[in-house]
Amino acid sequence: MDALAEGSIAATIATAAEVLGWICVIAGAFFCLVGGIGLLRMPDMFTRMHAAGVTDTMGAGLILAGLALHEGFTLITVKLGFILLFIVFSSPTATHALSQAALAGGLTPWRKGEPRDSEVYSTGPGPSKEEKATAREEASSKG
Amino acid sequence: MLRIISLGLLLYGTWLLLSGHYDPLLLTLGALSCAAVVGVCWRMDTIDREGHPNHLTWRAPWYWVWLAWEIVKSNIDVTRRILSPSLPIDPCVTEVLATQSDDLGQVIYANWITLTPGTVAMVVVPGRIVVHALTAEGAKELEGGRMGRRVCRMMGDPA
């Protein structure tokens, strides 16, 4: 095989890796977005944790894989691998701590048919601009 | 002793890959800091089967491949539920048996449960894990114990 053909094969592989990398990054961004939508749509803390799980497994994983494909075999790719490894070990630990804290705080998991937490805990609109302004004035006159 | 050496080599390898500098001064400084970390770990008595599980080195990666595939499958399921207009979820709390023979295996099992979207390990007590599942199917699947047996096999337990 002559040098020219060899060069074009290498170029094709590089282009393929680049395209695949972009597909991974875009797919990862999509799953991060889905995780965000899930956080807003889910009815309580425990179900929201599942939605957040989509972001830190599939979202982060695909974005890191995409960046690694973009970078090729370099030290940067190794570092991206380290990041993925740390996420894989730390995010379940954080999620577990969060659910333990929620249980210790007396939160009971939402069941089908119950109202969302925002309907239970929300106490109507917060203080208006005027009320905040008067509160600030009172506080500053005292201090 | 083997564990201490392998921890030192692992730390130094990590240091080399993260730094990317190979001049003698920095290599010596890196070696010294790795030795210091190993010394502290040794004094704290954390270089054991649990703190540095090097007996899993050759087996764990194959199970990670399987776990990654499980994570992809459950991600697609949870994504579909999140994006579906009717939000078809039916969360429930269930208890699964952790038949792994030591704490390390049970913690790995709980971590895997939490890592797959749709199931979260809420409480871990010896021998049992309380799980919050997004759907009844997810809870059933976990109660079937397929993942638990995988962890047992990875740890080399009779399952």
Image: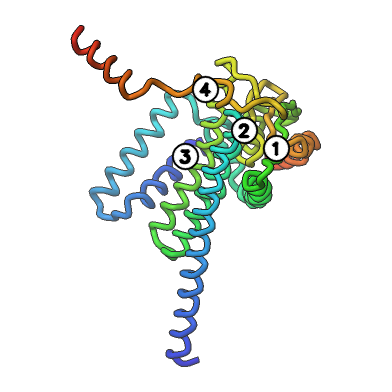
Name the secondary structure under disc 3: helix
Q: Amino acid at mark 1?
A: Ile
Q: CA distance from mark 3 to mark 2?
A: 39 Å
Q: CA distance from mark 1 to mark 4?
A: 23 Å
- Disc 2: which chain? A
Name the secondary structure under disc 1: loop
- Residue linked to disc 2: A47
Q: CA distance from mark 2 to mark 1?
A: 9 Å
For label 4, the crowd category at 10 Å Cα-Cα, with few meaning under 14, some 14 to 19 and many 20 or more, is few
Q: Amino acid at mark 2?
A: Thr
Picture layout, residue B68 above or below residue A43:
below
Whether the residues at callouts 2 and 1 have beta carbons within 8 Å, the answer is yes
| Residue B159 in view of the camera | no
Q: Position of residue B151 (x, y in %)?
A: 70, 39
Name the secondary structure under disc 2: helix
Residue under the image location 43 percent in, 29 percent down? B41
Q: CA distance from mark 2 to mark 4?
A: 18 Å
Name the residue nearer the viewer: A6 or B9: A6
Q: CA distance from mark 4 to mark 3?
A: 52 Å
Residue ranking furthest to the top:
A142
- Residue linked to disc 1: B89
Q: Is label 3 or label 2 in front?
A: 2
- Residue linked to disc 3: B7
- Residue linked to disc 4: A122
| Residue A1 in view of the camera | yes
